[in-house]
Amino acid sequence: MTRPPARRADVEPSKWPVGWQGAVYVQMRRLLDEYRLFFKEFRRTFHTTGAVLPSSPLLGRALARYVADRGSPDSPGGRRILEVGPGTGAVTRQIARGMTAKDRLDLVELNERFVQLLQRRFQQDPQLQPVASQATIMHLPLQDLDVAEPYDLIVSGLPLNNFSAHDVQMLLAAFQRLLRPGGTLSFFQYIAVRPLRRLWANREEKQRLGRISQVLCEWLGQHEIQRQAIWINMPPAWVHHLQFAQQKQPQHIEAHQITQTANDPAE
Ligand SMILES: C[S@@+](CC[C@H](N)C(=O)[O-])C[C@H]1O[C@@H](n2cnc3c(N)ncnc32)[C@H](O)[C@@H]1O
């Protein structure tokens, strides 16, 4: 069997053009590689990839704004940061820019092919290399992540619109469980995508999207501290920042159970 030729970007740096042209060439190759893989995964695993292209640098910067905000109460031992669904690392690069030498970054990624690419990027990419010794890539779903110490910051790229409302509820509850009280969760959702999808959806799909909106409205209403619209992204997106002041009742408690608790004289 004939093997495909090895990719030049990975194995033949001596043949790259030198100087600034070389730097531009390497960046273009990297971007093209990432876009190609992302699009392939969009087609292969649409349900969990959820986007055609990686996030733009502007969206990444908005998501990483609390990492870059050194005015936040940094713990003396450095902050514990979690990125969920890093994909090809578009947001990871913006997180890396804001990290201090003491911070730790954990990355949780479901897709094995993204995990392999990220491992290479942390070895080769000039923006990720400097924080490689502070980063741990974990190949597992967020739902299975269990840590002894909560995180100070969570940045998520999960495509919530592709999941059931129950799963969205569970994922948000997992964020709350993993975040220390007062820590910040940052995530995005594409602007107007749910209303647009509802236009040609069947009844069941309309109900699913409606329930996701309900769940998100409830969580954002209670915990959102800031939001920002990012128009330079494909498609444009809302970035939401949330804080959970204290551990709250699980959000999926039924209304009648809440009433019972409220009426319980022992409370
Ligand atoms: C919309 S892409 C975002 C990628 C990247 N953060 C960006 O903004 O370009 C969603 C990512 O979440 C990952 N993912 C989906 N479900 C996940 C889960 N339950 N746990 C961890 N990662 C998940 C996908 O494999 C994919 O990499």
Image (cartoon, rainbow, N blue to C red):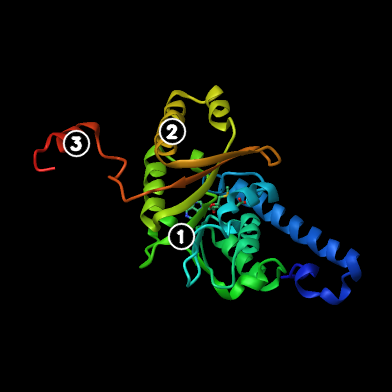
For the question of whether residue 17 can be seen, the reply is no
On residue 217, the disc is 2
Q: Label 3 crowding class (10 Å Cα cut-off): few <14, some 14-19, many 20+?
A: few
Tell me if 260 is positioned left or right of 243 in this view: left
On residue 257, the disc is 3
For the question of whether residue 178 can be seen, the reply is yes
Give yes or no for contact between labels 3 and 1 (Cβ–Cβ under 8 Å). no
Give yes or no for contact between labels 2 and 3 (Cβ–Cβ under 8 Å). no
Q: Amino acid at mark 3?
A: Gln
Give yes or no for contact between labels 2 and 1 (Cβ–Cβ under 8 Å). no
On residue 152, the disc is 1
Residue 57: % across, % down: 69, 51
N-term-proximal mark, 2 vs 1: 1
Tell me if 6 is positioned left or right of 202 in this view: right
Q: Secondary structure at mark 1?
A: strand
* Cα separation between marks 2 and 1: 24 Å
On screen, residue 34 above or below 11? above
On screen, residue 126 above or below 177? below
Q: Secondary structure at mark 2?
A: helix
Residue 176: % across, % down: 38, 51
* Cα separation between marks 3 and 1: 31 Å
Could you say which is closer to the camera, residue 104 or residue 6? 104
